[in-house]
Image (cartoon, rainbow, N blue to C red):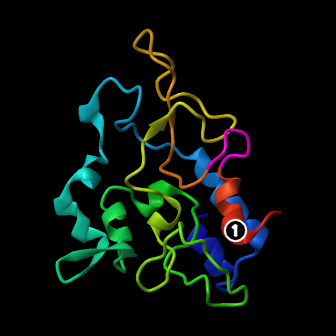
Amino acid sequence: MKGREVVKEMGGRTNGKLLLALVLSLSLFPVFPANGEGLSDPSADPHSHFQHPASCPRCHSYRGSEREPGRFLPGTDTFCLDCHSLEGLGITHPRAIRPADGQRRMRVPTDLPLDSEGKIFCLTCHKAHGPFLSSTRAFASQKAANPGTPAGTKPAYRTYFARRSDPVRGFVLLCEECHGKR
């Protein structure tokens, strides 16, 4: 069952523990290799378009010709979903919801951006301009994306572009920012 179907079956309301479990399950889904420290083939970076200025207007808000730092267009997820299908993402956090609405009236830290309508979107939890690989694991059971090959390189681990993670606690740090400690 997909995340949206779970929420729909529950009448549009989500239980905090269920939501946390859904978000934590993100760590189980593969992400395809891209450029980062320790990768031998920089041309394999499917996210390199984030480095091209021509792509900025696809996600960022502008006032005249000036980009508004930290402001994103409504529907920016469509840029992500050009390559990442909803079906391929499996269970994930609900998007296009306003954390300030509803029963919980959640507050989201400023470094976890919302779109210009105050809604959660892919870039709330993921940092598109961040590194794809790191020498630090994103979660405890994570396997290296390049287990020391070519000879002499350090193992590198996928970051999932997560704005927060911990080698022991995984993505729980990210979830706790809005949902609190469980």
Q: Report how many numbered discs are placed on residues in the image.
A: 1
Instruction: Tell me if residue 169 is in the magenta stretch.
Output: yes
Q: Position of residue 127 (x, y in %)?
A: 45, 56
Instruction: Tell me if residue 135 is in the magenta stretch.
Output: no
Q: Is residue 167 above or below residue 86?
A: above
Q: Position of residue 67 (x, y in %)?
A: 26, 73
The residue under the point 49% across, 56% down is 89
Q: Quadrant of the C terminus?
A: bottom right
- Which quadrant of the figure has residue 136? top right
Q: Is residue 17 above or below residue 43?
A: below
The residue under the point 49% across, 83% down is 118
The residue under the point 39% across, 13% down is 150
Magenta part, dominant SS: loop
Given residues 31 and 43, the one toward you in this image is: 43
The residue where tag 1 is placed is: 19
Q: Position of residue 30 (x, y in %)?
A: 50, 42
Q: Amino acid at mark 1?
A: Leu
Q: Which residues are magenta?
A: 165-170
Q: Is residue 118 above or below residue 167?
A: below
Q: Is residue 177 left or right of residue 40?
A: right
- Which quadrant of the figure has residue 90? bottom right
Q: Position of residue 139 (x, y in %)?
A: 65, 41
Q: Secondary structure at mark 1?
A: helix
> Which residue appears farthest toward the bottom when viewing the image?
102
